[in-house]
Amino acid sequence: MTQIALITGASRGLGFALAEALAPEYHIVAVGRTVGGLEDLDDRIKAKGGDATLAPMDVTNRDAMAQLCRSVFDRWGGAKLWIHTAIHAAPLAPADHLDQKDWDKSVNTNVTAMGHLIPFIAPLIGPEGTAVFFDDTHAGEKFFGHYGATKAAQMALVRSWQSEAEKIGPKVKILSPGPLRTATRGRFFPGEDKDALPLPKDVAAELLQQII
């Protein structure tokens, strides 16, 4: 039976790197907003002898995600692995100067979307599957109001699910890989020496040892 890995946030960064690293052992269902990034991922997976299904969509679109999950079920009967890396990283700003559009997008992507993603995807991976999330703690730090608050809320929900699933499954894993050379990191720390940070592809194999 084909092993299916659903990657939300696969068009760039850590999601891209993990999707590429999982091929060809897994068929990758790659969800992302950047079509060019998904196509690049598809090329790299094919070069390894693997296959991918590209899903250029936004995780905040509840109906689209419902249809995708239904399609995965109808075609393969479910998935073995879900890796979630989709995130909105709004620019840093003082708490009394938060941009309303960035706040709404942060809440919708980082929090609200989880309210349908977990209920939709949990039945797909079933009690034997694995769901993986990545913590990046900035709650309460200066200027991290958009990201810190919504990421903390996201992880609170994930930890609730992790506790609930401890004895009955699925496995819910929370990893903290540390600083990486990603667009998100670059947005928060533009003056940082990027060359001193590892690329996501450089840590993907090590992270997979903790995932599968």
Image (cartoon, rainbow, N blue to C red):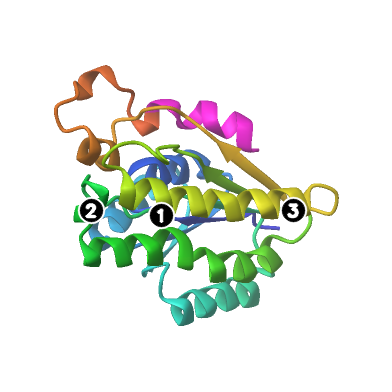
Residue type, numbered disc 3: Pro
Q: Distance of mark 2 from mark 1, alpha carbons?
A: 26 Å
Would you say residue 185 is visible in this rendering? yes
Q: Residue at x 19, y 24 (%)?
A: 192
Outermost residue to the right = 167
Task: State yes or no: residue 180 in magenta.
Answer: no
Horizontal side, residue 165 vs residue 76: left or right: right
- Sequence-wise, the earlier of marks 3 and 2 is 2
Q: Check disc 3 and report the residue beneath it.
A: 170
Q: Amino acid at mark 1?
A: Ala
Residue type for callout 2: Asp
Q: Nearer the viewer, residue 59 or 53?
A: 59
* Sequence-earlier tag: 2 or 1: 1
**CA gap, disc 3 and disc 2:** 40 Å
Q: Quadrant of the N terminus?
A: bottom right
Which badge, 3 or 1, comes first in the chain's sequence? 1
Which residue is tagged 2? 96
Q: Quadrant of residue 92?
A: top left
Q: Residue at x 29, y 57 (%)?
A: 39
**Mark 2 near mark 1, Cβ–Cβ under 8 Å?**
no
Q: Looking at this view, is 145 or 199 the one in front?
A: 145
Image depth: mark 3 or mark 2 in front:
2
- Specify the segment rendered in magenta: 202-212
The dot on residue 86 is 1
